[in-house]
Amino acid sequence: MKKDYKLPDLSSARRRNKEKSERVEFSIEDKYLNLGEGKKYHIITHGCQANQRDSETMAGIMEALGYTVSESTDKADVIIINTCAIRQGAEEKVYGEIGALKRQKMKNPDLVIAVGGCMTQEENTVKNLIEKYRQVDIVFGTHNITSLPELLYGVYESKSRKIEVFSKMGEVIENVPVSRFGKHKAWVNIMYGCDKFCTYCIVPYTRGKERSRRYEDVLFEVEELKNQGYKEICLLGQNVNAYGKDIYDDYDFGKLLNDVAKIGIPRVRFMTSHPWDFNDGMIEAIKNNSNIMPYIHLPLQSGNTDVLKKMNRRYTSEKYMELFDKLKKELPGFAFTTDIIVGFPTESDEAFEDTLKMVDHCQYDNAFTFIFSPREGTPAASMEDHTPKEVKEERLQRLNEKVAYYANLNNQKFKDATVEVLVDGISKKKDNVYSGYTKENKLVNFTGDNIEVGEFVMVKITEVMSFSLNGVAIEK
Ligand code: SAH
Ligand code: SF4
Ligand code: F3S
């Protein structure tokens, strides 16, 4: 078969330059507009918030083409799997899923299966999909979402597979349709990509270079969300502190945060702030706007300076502690969470103890903890690693026990308190049990009458657990 595609490659995905990224306006050619008439699509999403938001874009494009959403895979004419490559486990799950769809494809040869997201930016994944997963019709990269109309059209026209994955720095595409999954909470991209190149991480390769959206575009989107009645937004970037640096001399994340908050959506959050370059302008903006929520996610990764250096994290354990203490002092009542990797190559018992000490110092509200997973093509994947798997598992368990201890300790402050909860949903198990989050991003399960999803409810906390709170709604 003639090869009409090019495999992605991680070494060219490493390329970075100082040129400003291009701003491109998206539009759909007329000939694609009725492609989905009478047909249904279903999207399966893995990975982080960036992927969630990308899936909303894919959904928006599908609906612009005339497709309607199907709640399950078995009634869908097009199934899109939006993948994550952050750890081996995430990838295995996706392969299992694609494997399971083989039967459906055999029963219905007209079914179109499309695989997108971070995994498809890896050469090996694309090779695997082409050679071993014949049921897959479309493979599209993170830079190729806006090619979906053309790719689908190609599959219908030629009845052959379409592969399009660009290993490039990427542009900023505006005016792309979106079908948001939530009616009261929304994700807002403020920038794409990552230039930090932490040595364990695949993201800078799969997502291209750090590129900011123009602030006018961000503010316009937030205004629109306000007009549509959204109650909470989360500004998204792999490293939001770097916002604006690639395109502006005098407009940064602190300014954006301030301008976004002034639009007046009741709850504003942001994700993720790297400890490197968390500046005073950001702290001021947070202090000056009561609708910026009292919650900060500040990834630590390791509490040991040598390990941090090998991870290319750009801060020492002392610097992290200094920043953490400053934030804690300047922002009283804030909740703090973190990410930690155990078993990074060369992490000794002593180095791991330093991580535990840092957790004792910071007493996080919660932490997302992971065992190091080598990602092919990243520098850490070829570092010598002598720590046995069992030792890594034991470290993870010890760490998790500590994390749970402090999570519980922090939650004790909420016993008998009255908190504001933005209602997300009704419990699947019990009729009058609802759930939602406090300003500090604490999960609350509570009972109440006449409660609506998307409203703010004051809840009296009656019971405290490590990772959630229970309570009763106060009469309105
Ligand atoms: N941009 C964010 C992180 C996104 S990835 C930041 O820097 O904070 C989310 C988390 O996954 C990371 O913080 C890290 O803890 C974890 N992670 C990333 N690569 C990993 C790997 N190869 N093995 C294990 N955990 C990893
Ligand atoms: Fe990965 Fe580091 Fe970039 Fe976060 S900052 S996405 S961990 S390279
Ligand atoms: Fe996964 Fe890609 Fe996000 S690797 S964590 S989906 S940026």
Image (spheres, grey):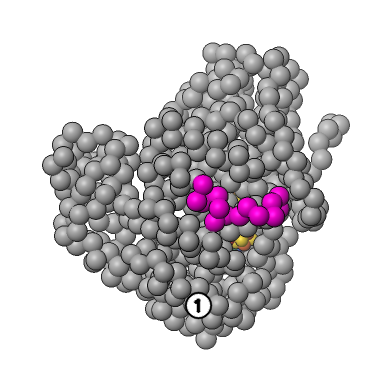
Where residue 439 appears, x then y in whole percent? 34, 53
Q: Residue at x 61, y 55 (%)?
A: 252
Q: Within the magenta stretch, is there residue 256? A: yes
Where residue 297 appears, x then y in whole percent? 46, 61
Q: Residue furthest left?
A: 475
Where residue 83 appears, x then y in whole percent? 59, 44
> 229 and 146: which one is in front?
229
| Residue 341 visible in the displayed image | no
Q: Which residue is mark 1?
A: 322
> 250 and 427: which one is in front?
250
Q: Within the magenta stretch, is there residue 331? A: no
Q: Secondary structure at mark 1?
A: helix
Report the quarter where the C terminus lies. top left
Q: Amino acid at mark 1?
A: Glu
> 227 and 359: which one is in front?
227
Q: Residue at x 62, y 13 (%)?
A: 34
| Residue 298 visible in the displayed image | yes
Where residue 118 appears, x then y in whole percent? 64, 47
Q: Give the extent of the magenta segment.
A: 246-259
Mark 1 nearby-residue class (10 Å; few <14, some 14–19, many ≥20): few
Q: Is residue 220 above or below residue 306?
A: above
Q: Residue at x 54, y 61 (%)?
A: 281
> 310 and 232: which one is in front?
232
Q: Is residue 98 above or below residue 247?
A: above
Q: Residue at x 45, y 45 (%)?
A: 262
